[in-house]
Image (cartoon, helix red, strand yellow):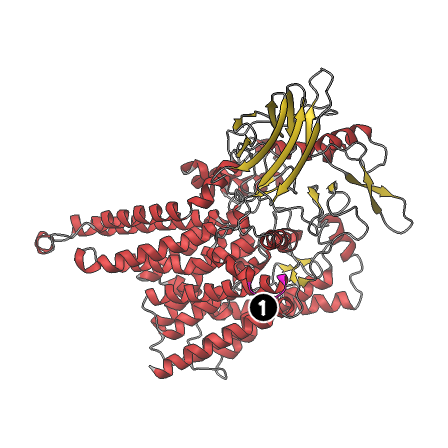
Amino acid sequence: MRTLFRQELVLWIALTGALCALFFPGWYHSQVPAFRDGYHFYYPQAVWLEQSARRGELFPTWNPNEGLGVSVAGQPSAALYYPLRVLWFLPGLTLPQRYTVFMLVHLLLAAAGVNYAARSLNLRPGPRWLAAIAFTFSCPVVFQHSNLIFLCSAAWLGFAAGAGIRLLQLPIHQFRAIRGPWIASCVVFAGSVSCMMLAGDPHTAANTLIIAGLAWNVLAVRTFHHRFLLAKHLRDAHPNTGVGAARAAGWLIASCSLIAATTAVQWIPAYRWAKHSSRVKQASVARLDATLPGWNSTPQPVVSHRVYDFSLSPWHLTTVAWPTLGGHFIPRNGRLFALIPAEGRMWIPSLYFGCIPCCLVLHSLSRPRGPGWWLCMLMLVSWLFAIGNYSLVWLIREMSQGLGLIAWANQLPPDHCASLYGLLNYLCPTYSAFRYPAKWTTWFALGCSLLAAWQWNQLESQRSLVLTRITKWLMAISLIGLTACVAGWAMIVSGNAPNLDPWLESIADDRLLGSPTAKDIARSCIWAFALPAFVIACVFGRWGLRNWQWLPWITLIEMACVANHWLIFAPPPLADAHGPTRDAFVWSSPSTDPAQLGKLTTLQTPALHATQSIEPVALFQLRSWLVRHDQLTAHQPNLDEVLSAVGVTHRRVEVQSAKRPAYAWQPIPGAAALCELLETGATLSESSLNWQWHGSCQLEVSLRCDEAQTLIIRQFNDGGWQIADKLSKQRYEIAESPLFIEVQLPAGAHELSMDRKWLW
């Protein structure tokens, strides 16, 4: 026992050390993830939340400085009520360092969760650690450092899966004997899914409940087997036989009840805020004609979110064996998959989870048995969900267009009609609010890791590893691919392929990453084929290692080297030194800066422009109109009129530059104030109007008017505000408006307090 504890401790230290080495730029140099949302979304959000905490607001429910006001409580990505949010308040660290510690803790949690799931399968310590390392360092997990909430949810997947496995292994008779484990697994499962939701990822939480529903069907089949297929005397001997499905249904109902109760503080405001977005069908096209002077076009119809944008292309399956075959994307673009015309938007660059686990999975697929069969089903179903829009209809459409049958291909139904993810959206109508089929890749990585561990556990009675036919084929293909890629790289370096880079630029140019280069593609392919060939030669060759206990260590070293290709850090974004004052409300067109993405924002924090995961329809319409009409020129009176009505003080315009396009901030004349009396046709009498924010969730307005007036407050009207007059003790109703808060006030003096309602 002492030896086992010592081995476990050494592996934990090694795992932590490897993660700290990978995230060295974050905790030592105070840098942040440079790719995608980690840089432009979560870090700016963390800056604003830290500033709110310094003001004493640990749970700010509204951000008045972004867009036209944003419900922070309604944005699950803010994770206000996530228990591990306490890591953001660690003393003595900079914010980027806390960011890094937050990611490291969740990667260690992911390893602990998979270890728990493998223990639920009664696996030995070696296979358990192989599964934990393979999952933690797999690309579908470690790459989510660029999308923080998805990393948080992946950290709890193992615990949820372990709880489900323990339920499946309970005997379906002996009710009193299983009551304790039944309750324990229910609490662990509900706690894990609740943490996913509170961390800001309801999509993965919904996916986990779907897996739990499939597990219930497994128990239902077992119950049917015991009730109708066993001999009658066996049923008489066990009067409680056959209640397994009912008990599992009770387990699932109890778990869902616990989840709903513990996460109500998050999902209620999120649902209310989402009702204003295009994710909910009740949201209608906003009419802004009366609200915004200068609005001179019919609002564009709201296009519902394309839930299949981030579908995982089928050729990503090759990266299970060859990690970087799809190509690198940072620091220079070498993406091979970008050359495929049907390649969609990239969610993850690879599905790799280790060469040794891959060989074990391939060996297990030939003859799955027992729990291994169910793990194979989990792996297959999650992959079919992840490919989303890449269905049989899609394949027929692509082949028809390739043959020139374009008119016939246009008559085919939508691609998702023949996909498993499309079926899921039909069976669960509200599931369409989630947009990313590729998020199922974390479940795919979990299934593969556990399946590899299960296969090792089954073969561990043998003294050495067996070089199976599948492994031989993998070795042969890797050597052939390595030879071809080295030859191609040599041709490119020697200058024998001068027209290759211009051709790549013509077919696969990327606005953010640039066009891929032939040298980088060849280099990534060399690495992709060389690594598995080296590992297979070392482990499975006659001159290699034959001791099973070294497999977790080899996988740890290998996966740490590979994961280094998927991690990149950069200094945190800084404020625009040449911009307007920090309390300015600005508009920046996407044409000026890809990082801005056309957001209305203030400069209270550096580049605080994209902390909204759910966007109201009215704001979407406004931004779409601004993008279409902004020509980046100094003289645009119609555009300035709309911007001034919204309250924008500055916009970016293009200035002359001999070297490259340059931009400057131009003031908007007559920008409207936050609070204003709306002219109703009559001459306004003299009035005084003052306002002040107390924190982010309470606005105090004092005014005196000689006749009845309409007060307009330029904050988004989501129905979550209540306004009371401190002088008259009267509450005022807020008029319906697609954008702003409007209140009818009688003549006299008023001291208004505008506060957020509970759970909005």
Residue 171 versus residue 465 in the image, above or below: above
The residue pinned by badge 1 equals 562
Query: Count of labels shown?
Result: 1
Residue 714 versus residue 25 in the image, above or below: above
Q: Residue at x 60, y 25 (%)?
A: 743
Q: Main secondary structure of the magenta part?
A: loop
Tell me residue 750's x, y (percent).
61, 28
> Where are the magenta residues, as a range?
90-95
Work out whether residue 313 or residue 239 is closer to the camera in this orientation and state it.
239
**Residue occupying the far right of the picture:** 658
Tell me residue 233's x, y (percent).
7, 54
Residue 235 versus residue 27 in the image, above or below: above
Work out whether residue 90 or residue 743 is closer to the camera in this orientation and state it.
743
User: Looking at numbered disc 1 in the image, what kind of residue is underneath it?
Assistant: Val
Residue 252 versus residue 706 in the image, above or below: below
Work out whether residue 291 or residue 688 is closer to the camera in this orientation and state it.
688
Residue 319 visible in the snapshot: no
Quadrant of the drawing holding the N terminus: bottom left
Residue 494 is one of the magenta-drawn residues: no
Q: Residue at x 44, y 54 (%)?
A: 195
Work out whether residue 182 or residue 464 is closer to the camera in this orientation and state it.
182
Tell me residue 134's x, y (percent).
48, 67
In the image: residue 652, left or right of residue 303: right
Residue 425 visible in the snapshot: yes
Tell me residue 444's x, y (percent).
46, 56
Callout 1 crowding tier (Cα within 10 Å): few <14, some 14–19, many ≥20: many
Determine the secondary structure under disc 1: helix
Please tell me in which quadrant of the rendered image residue 462 appears: bottom left
